[in-house]
């Protein structure tokens, strides 16, 4: 008798559970989208993606979830459709209780602005482009040049990140001019010359060499004496004198040369400039290596 009562209770509970499931499904099938909440994850003073803009974009591509049965709303489709927008980096769409649809979007985060002829666009870390418009401006590094799928603008990220991480470099560099993969120029705020860094690798060493050149050579020769300073070569800074194509070389050994070397150790001539030449006489025979 006791076991029979237990079985009866178990059957009743199972029946109630099944009824609850069917009732919930029926209610869910009838439930309609009564509210759409759009959240911009990285909204700030430079916000150009708004909840209203997201809803307009959905309507533009023929997606209008409001008042539709919740079971008919394809959240994956909404995410994929909005991800194609050039203004959005990623989107997450979920269904919530009481007929709510939540859309979380992250607007584009530019890392540089590229000027390619008459075309100008912003680009993020993943290489996604966003057309530059008068309605939006982001204070990011300016890059001029023509890029390809084989050599996209993101190849310059190590250089840009190094500049952005150093307040002195941010003030120094006004623009980057990309000619080709081994001839990338920075246009400094100091007028009169440009700096060829070669390829965008070993940028720490290259900027150390540039700092040394600025400290030890430019005060002696003057800031208008050279038109091009090249950091392409290993252990050297090669500068071209204005008007006359005479190269000026500064030997650089990161293990020996320190930024605070006394200017008295600097030997200067019209042909070459060698740092601490008397202390390191063998450095002038070092072989150049183009990076």
Image: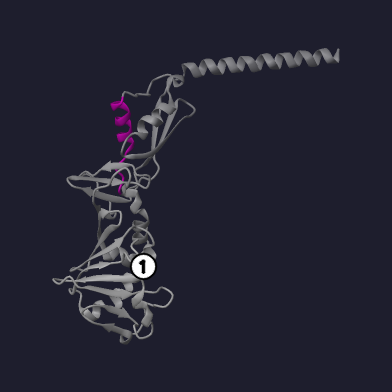
Asked whether 60 falls inside the magenta stretch, the response is: yes
Q: Residue at x 15, y 72 (%)?
A: 244
Q: Quadrant of the C terminus?
A: bottom left
Q: Quadrant of the N terminus?
A: top right
Q: Is residue 29 left or right of residue 46?
A: right
Q: Nearer the viewer, residue 282 or 83?
A: 282
Q: Residue at x 31, y 79 (%)?
A: 274
Task: Describe the colour scheme in one phrase.
Answer: one colour
Q: Is residue 28 left or right of residue 123?
A: right
Q: Nearer the viewer, residue 167 or 151?
A: 151
Which image quarter: residue 179?
bottom left
Vertical side of 14 occupied by 196: above or below: below
Asked whether 86 falls inside the magenta stretch, the response is: no
Secondary-structure class at tag 1: loop
Give the magenta part as a residue range.
Answer: 46-61
Residue 283: x, y in percent? 37, 77
Residue 11: x, y in percent? 73, 13
Q: Residue furthest left?
A: 243
**Residue annotated with mark 1:** 234
Q: Residue at x 33, y 44 (%)?
A: 150
How many numbered marks, from 0 up? 1
Q: Nearer the viewer, residue 138 or 147?
A: 147
Vertical side of 5 occupied by 172: above or below: below
Magenta: predominant secondary structure element? helix
Vertical side of 79 occupied by 177: above or below: below
Q: Nearer the viewer, residue 166 or 186?
A: 186
Q: Is residue 5 left or right of residue 207?
A: right
Q: Residue furthest right?
A: 1
**Label 1: few (<14), some or many (≥20) within 10 Å?**
some
Residue 275: x, y in percent? 33, 80
């Amino acid at each position: 008798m006791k076991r029979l009562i237990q079985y009866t209770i178990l059957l009743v509970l199972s029946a109630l559970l099944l009824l609850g499931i069917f009732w919930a499904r029926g209610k869910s099938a009838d439930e309609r989208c009564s509210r759409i909440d759009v959240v911009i994850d990285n909204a700030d003073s430079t916000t150009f993606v708004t909840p209203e803009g997201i809803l307009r974009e959905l309507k533009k591509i023929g997606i209008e979830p409001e008042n539709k049965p919740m079971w008919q709303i394809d959240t994956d489709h909404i995410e994929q459709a909005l991800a194609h927008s050039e203004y959005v980096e990623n989107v997450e769409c979920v269904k919530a209780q009481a007929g709510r649809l939540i859309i979380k979007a992250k607007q584009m985060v530019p890392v540089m602005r590229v000027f390619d002829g008459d075309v100008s666009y912003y680009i993020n870390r993943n290489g996604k482009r966003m057309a530059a418009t008068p309605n939006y401006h982001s204070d990011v590094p300016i890059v001029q040049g023509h890029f390809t799928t084989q050599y996209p603008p993101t190849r310059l990220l190590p250089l840009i990140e190094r500049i952005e991480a150093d307040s002195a470099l941010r003030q120094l560099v006004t623009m980057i001019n990309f000619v080709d993969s081994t001839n990338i120029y920075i246009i400094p705020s100091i007028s009169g010359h440009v700096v060829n860094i070669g390829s965008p690798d070993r940028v720490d060493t290259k900027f150390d060499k540039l700092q040394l050149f600025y400290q030890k050579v430019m005060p002696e020769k003057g800031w208008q004496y050279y038109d091009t300073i090249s950091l392409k070569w290993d252990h050297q800074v090669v500068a071209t004198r204005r008007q006359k194509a005479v190269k000026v070389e500064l030997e650089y050994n990161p293990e020996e040369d320190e930024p605070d070397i006394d200017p008295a150790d600097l030997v200067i001539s019209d042909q070459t400039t060698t740092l601490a030449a008397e202390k390191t006489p063998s450095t002038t025979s070092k072989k150049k290596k183009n990076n």
